[in-house]
Image (spheres, rainbow, N blue to C red):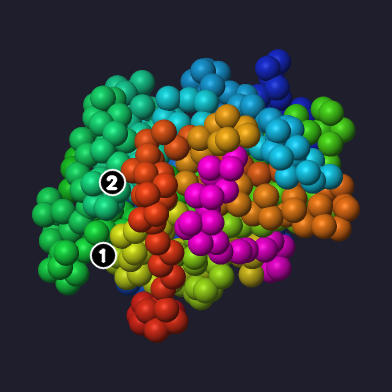
């Protein structure tokens, strides 16, 4: 189908799973700024990206105009193991809150990896296999992305090298062991395995690591191994494209029953879940077909949207990656070690950053203890133990439902439940034992890292 304006409903198969991913950039008046070469400050070309990324993924990354990308049959066959994922009406939560609001959540935890990350992991692994590569390298924060990628690589027979943020490597040993079960090698980052890792350790002795550190190591590892490429679990345009399957399924289910959401909420770390969930709805809004209220929820300990600066910055701490224009706390920003979830990246997706900058979505930050209070409340009434990341969205969904209770408004709220928290029990234990704290970076701490932004 060549007509890019054909309604997305045409692209559903007999199981109501999308046949194509949707690229929200095609409908954005203000496109996200291009990635820049850190040396020349000129837009990165496909040739410059080729040593790092797979060829087909580069094409997806750089394409701001194609609205729909057909999902290869091999990927759709893999998706059928767990997709379409459930869209659930939270009747019990509504009753508990005594709210007139209708609450729905899109549950992405019904697969072995336990999160939405598998949607992009299988796509990126597929394109690596198709290109004839031996393996891929990556980073992971809380471990959801590393788990998903290791599963996808095992399925396709690819080698998988994961650099896991050191504090998560130590706090979440079971997530690490799932990766190893699927054949991945897992290294705590920063490490002594790479030149950039050794440099970071020298500059930041005793550091507990960050996603920025782990990205630097993974990129170096890919470039130094013949037949390997680097893959990323969030932030980049290609990842939001793959994750659009979340929003497309959500919209298809809601349309089927004549339900139009008023508020759409997602947790935000790098932006993969939020971007995937809101994409088709945002597309409608950009085309003037509908209006929604979008809310990004981030941790107060890593507040990229709410306290960061919209500027070009390095995607990694080691400053070996391209520059991206995004809301950022600075590539040297390292979240506090007591931050329990995976929402610890210093920047935000360029797509989401541009939408936020244009006033098309809102952002709020929430404290960690409040997040776990919401997670516990949700688990007790809905029967799912949510991942800490997902619980950020739950917290704000509950807040909005309670506002409806106060005002008497019957709004429809949709939020993304990105995954389960069964590998995050150390964090739940700290919360229950009263040992969890709310660390919020000071203005001075943020100023120090923001002041180090490259001059572009």
Q: Nearer the viewer, mark 1 or mark 2?
A: 2
Q: Residue 51, how many percent across, how many down?
A: 30, 49
Q: Is residue 247 left or right of residue 326?
A: right
Q: For the C terminus, which image quadrant?
A: bottom left
Mark 1 sits on what residue? 318
Pick the front one: 377 or 26: 377
Left/right of residue 315 with respect to residue 117 in the rendered view: left
Residue 338 place in picture, x, y as percent: 34, 58
The residue under the point 55% across, 61% down is 366
Question: Is residue 375 covered in magenta?
Answer: yes
Q: Is residue 215 visible?
A: yes
Quadrant occupied by the N terminus? top right
Q: Quadrant of residue 179?
A: top left
Residue bearing mark 2: 171
Horizontal side of 148 relative to 350 (left or right) equals left
- Residue 99 shows which numbered tag? none
- Magenta stretch: give its range: 358-378
In three-dimensional space, the C-alpha distance between marks 1 and 2, rounded to whole angstroms, equals 24 Å
x 19%, y 69%: residue = 204
Q: Is residue 317 above or below residue 165?
A: below
Snapshot quadrant of residue 20 = top right
Q: Is residue 218 visible?
A: no
């Amino acid at each position: 189908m060549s007509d890019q304006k054909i309604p997305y409903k045409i692209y559903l198969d007999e199981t109501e799973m999308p046949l194509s991913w949707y690229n929200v950039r095609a409908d954005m008046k203000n496109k996200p700024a291009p990635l820049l070469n850190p040396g020349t400050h000129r837009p990165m070309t496909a040739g410059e990206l080729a040593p790092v990324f797979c060829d087909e993924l580069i094409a997806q990354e750089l394409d701001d105009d194609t609205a729909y990308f057909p999902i290869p049959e091999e990927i759709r066959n893999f998706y059928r193991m767990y997709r379409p994922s459930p869209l659930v009406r939270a009747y019990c939560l509504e009753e508990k809150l005594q709210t007139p609001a209708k609450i729905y959540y899109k549950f992405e935890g019904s697969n072995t990896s336990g999160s939405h990350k598998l949607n992009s992991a299988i796509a990126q692994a597929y394109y690596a296999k198709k290109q004839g590569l031996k393996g891929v390298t990556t980073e992971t924060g809380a471990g959801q992305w590393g788990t998903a990628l290791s599963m996808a690589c095992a399925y396709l027979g690819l080698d998988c090298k994961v650099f896991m943020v050191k504090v998560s490597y130590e706090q979440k040993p079971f997530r690490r062991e799932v990766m190893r079960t699927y054949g991945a090698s897992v290294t705590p980052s920063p490490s002594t395995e790479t030149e950039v890792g050794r440099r970071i350790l020298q500059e930041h002795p005793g550091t507990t690591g960050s996603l920025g550190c782990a990205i630097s190591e993974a990129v170096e590892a890919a470039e130094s191994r013949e037949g390997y490429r680097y893959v990323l679990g969030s932030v980049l345009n290609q990842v939001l494209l793959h994750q659009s399957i979340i929003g497309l399924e959500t919209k298809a289910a809601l349309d089927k029953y004549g339900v139009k959401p008023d508020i759409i909420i997602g947790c935000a770390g790098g932006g993969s879940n939020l971007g995937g969930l809101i994409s088709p709805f945002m597309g409608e809004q950009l085309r003037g077909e509908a209006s929604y209220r979008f809310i990004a929820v981030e941790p107060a300990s890593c507040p990229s949207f709410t306290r960061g600066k919209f500027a070009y910055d390095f995607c990694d701490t080691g400053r070996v990656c391209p520059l991206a224009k995004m809301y950022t706390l600075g590539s040297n920003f390292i979240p506090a070690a007591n931050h329990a979830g995976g929402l610890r990246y210093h920047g935000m997706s360029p797509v989401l950053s541009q939408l936020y900058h244009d006033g098309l979505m809102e952002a709020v930050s929430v404290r960690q203890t409040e997040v776990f209070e919401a997670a516990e409340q949700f688990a007790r009434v809905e029967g799912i133990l949510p991942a800490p990341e997902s619980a950020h969205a739950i917290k704000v969904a509950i807040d909005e439902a309670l506002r409806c209770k106060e005002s008497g408004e019957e709004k429809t709220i949709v939020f993304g439940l990105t995954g389960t928290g069964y590998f995050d029990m150390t964090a739940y234990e700290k919360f229950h034992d009263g040992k969890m704290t709310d660390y919020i970076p000071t203005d001075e701490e943020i100023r120090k890292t923001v002041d180090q932004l490259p001059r572009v």
